[in-house]
Image (cartoon, helix red, strand yellow):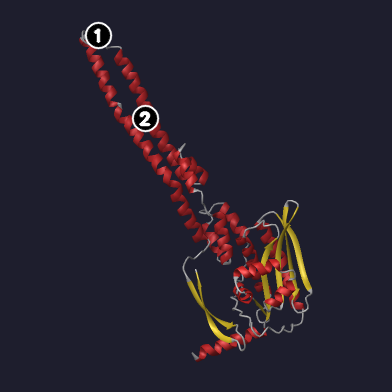
Amino acid sequence: MKHTLILLFLALAAYAQQERVAIINTLDDRDSMSISDLTYLTDKLREAAVNTLPSERFGVMTTESIVAFLGSLENTVRVCKESSCLAELGKKVSADYVAQGRIGRFGDNLTIKVELYNVKSGNLMGSFTGNFKDIFSLLTLIDEKTPDLFKKMLTEPKAQKPEPSPEVVPPVAPQSVPPVKTVNPADIQALIKNGLEKNKEQIIRESFYLSPSEKMFLYEENKKTSAVSLMLLNFIPGFGLGSYIQGDKTWGIVQSVIEVAGLGLTIISINKTIKINDEGDSYSICYHTDPTCKEKKDKLDDESKKMFVPAVAGIVIFGVGWFYGIWAPVKYETKYNKTLKGALNINDNISYSIDPLIIPRAGTPAVGLAFNVRY
């Protein structure tokens, strides 16, 4: 217990010497992007700050730290939207520097503007703008521009921290060290589109260096979700049409062959039965008077009865392929999504961690430990 307290106070002393950097929620003036996409972009900006800034001088605030100052996640989103001055918003969360991205539109393209402010002086330290057509070109733009923006903080002398209000003391969780290697999610997206099974091993190796939010973004973008409608296509008109559209060419071909073979056998048997019966009918007039005529008609009747077996067999074969084909899209979708999740190294297991935390309260702040559950 004694060693734990020593480590805790050393960690808190290190945080006190750091300058705090707050990456505020990315806003969308035109509601062109979903909340999950905006959260992902905020995570990318925060990750760029962690990768660029030396940890011994700067501490990048987590989402949980910012929410602790503003009361709740809902209130955080509201305050970010209503705030007219980014530097003032930085003071509310007791940050030394504050940055935020904002999505807009120019013509047919979406635009992004990222600004970085010195909270104490209120001065704009730097910004960049750009336009993009899809999320992957936006990620490339962020990867290119963001490091240069945050490097502007390295040329400034260490800032004097603003005095926090007595009631609020900033909780800053420790930052994990990011992987040395960086991977562009767009490259992994291309590998998935080019064939998940074919590129599975390479995807596993590359996705190891992605953040959890990047992995989930790629999974949501590429997972299959249309099994129900494709089941209907395998039901009517059948012949594996739904499986072909889904990308399951193997079962599409198997179902087509089974149903064509079964249907063909049935049609051939029925046609042959009709011809035999027509020929047998020609002997009906002389059936009771001519022994030769009777013999020929009886023989044709026996052949007609024998054709019943292949006709039924054809129906059964067709039915087996048709019935299994109805469920094939569900089986393929489940298997594909499971393979995709495994290739992206997405772990569904619950993880736990204990982090040092300063608990804000009136008067002297209390020191404690935060028990985190991630799942």
Q: In terms of secondary structure, where does tag 2 sit?
A: helix
Residue linked to disc 1: 286
Labels in figure, total: 2
Looking at the rendered structure, the kind of residue marked 2 is Thr
Is tag 2's residue or tag 1's residue first in the polypeptide sequence?
2
Q: Is residue 151 visible?
A: no
Q: Picture coordinates of residue 35 (x, y %)?
A: 62, 61
Determine whether, in the image, residue 322 is placed left or right of residue 207: left
Q: How far separated are the C-alphas under marks 2 and 1? A: 32 Å
Q: Picture coordinates of residue 50 (x, y %)?
A: 65, 73
Q: Picture coordinates of residue 191 (x, y %)?
A: 58, 55
Residue linked to disc 2: 266
Q: Quadrant of residue 145?
A: bottom right
Q: Picture coordinates of residue 39 (x, y %)?
A: 62, 64
Looking at the rendered structure, the kind of residue marked 1 is Cys
Mark 2 burial class by Cα count in 10 Å: few <14, some 14-19, many 20+: many
- At horizontal 53% and vertical 61% (from top left) the residue drawn is 344
- At horizontal 32% and vertical 32% (from top left) the residue drawn is 312
Give the farthest residue toward the bottom: 2
Q: Quadrant of residue 136?
A: bottom right
- At horizontal 42% and vertical 46% (from top left) the residue drawn is 327
- The disc placed on residue 311 is none
In the image, residue 322 above or below residue 145: above
Mark 1 burial class by Cα count in 10 Å: few <14, some 14-19, many 20+: few
In the image, residue 118 above or below residue 107: below
Q: In terms of secondary structure, where does tag 1 sit?
A: loop
Determine contact: label 2, label 1, CB under 8 Å: no
